[in-house]
Amino acid sequence: QVQLAESGGGLVQAGGSLRLSCAVSGRSFSTVVTGWFRQAPGKEREFVAAITWSAGLRYYADSVKGRFTISRDTTKNTVYLQKSTLEPEDTAVYYCAASLYRDRVTDSQSYTYWGQGTQVTVSS
């Protein structure tokens, strides 16, 4: 089993910044990719960003490229999502997820383990 715990959500004004953290525990050594997804009210869950643990390869949704940065600290088993130039459209519950596989990193079905989510609200 792999456990994930998100933190860092909150209320921020448009144009502001926020950093989310995802602490990975349990059988974390089996995790190949850790990703961030988000779900806004009334919308489907969508891919935001992902990173591979070994090489640190990064993947981003087009909607966040240039504004969000994903990183990982292998010594702390933690993945971060640095978000800048936030927009009201970024308001959502952000979920951290772990995949045991390298392929289809943008597909939520590829991820086996999920955190509880953290709310991010961007006011205009």
Image (spheres, rainbow, N blue to C red):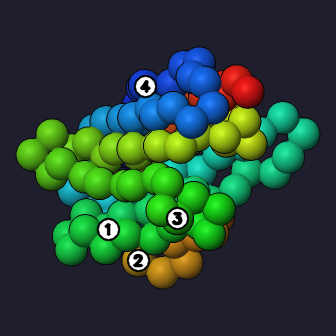
Q: How many marks?
A: 4
Which badge, 2 or 3, comes first in the chain's sequence? 3
Quadrant of residue 71 in the image?
Answer: bottom left
Q: CA distance from mark 2 to mark 4?
A: 26 Å
Which badge, 3 or 1, comes first in the chain's sequence? 1
Q: CA distance from mark 4 to mark 3?
A: 20 Å
Q: Say whether marks 3 and 1 touch (CB < 8 Å).
A: no
Q: Which residue is mark 3?
A: 65
SS label for mark 3: loop
Farthest top residue? 11
SS label for mark 4: loop
Q: CA distance from mark 1 to mark 2?
A: 8 Å
Farthest right residue? 42
Q: Which residue is mark 4?
A: 8
Is residue 81 left or right of 122 when viewed as pictured? left
Q: Residue at x 66, y 40 (%)?
A: 87
Q: Residue at x 90, y 39 (%)?
A: 42
Counting from the top left corner in percent of width and height, residue 74 is at: 15, 51
> Disc 2 residue type?
Arg
Which badge, 4 or 3, comes first in the chain's sequence? 4
Quadrant of residue 89 in the image?
Answer: top right
The C terminus: image quadrant: top right
> Disc 4 residue type?
Gly
Is residue 111 left or right of 20 when viewed as pictured? right
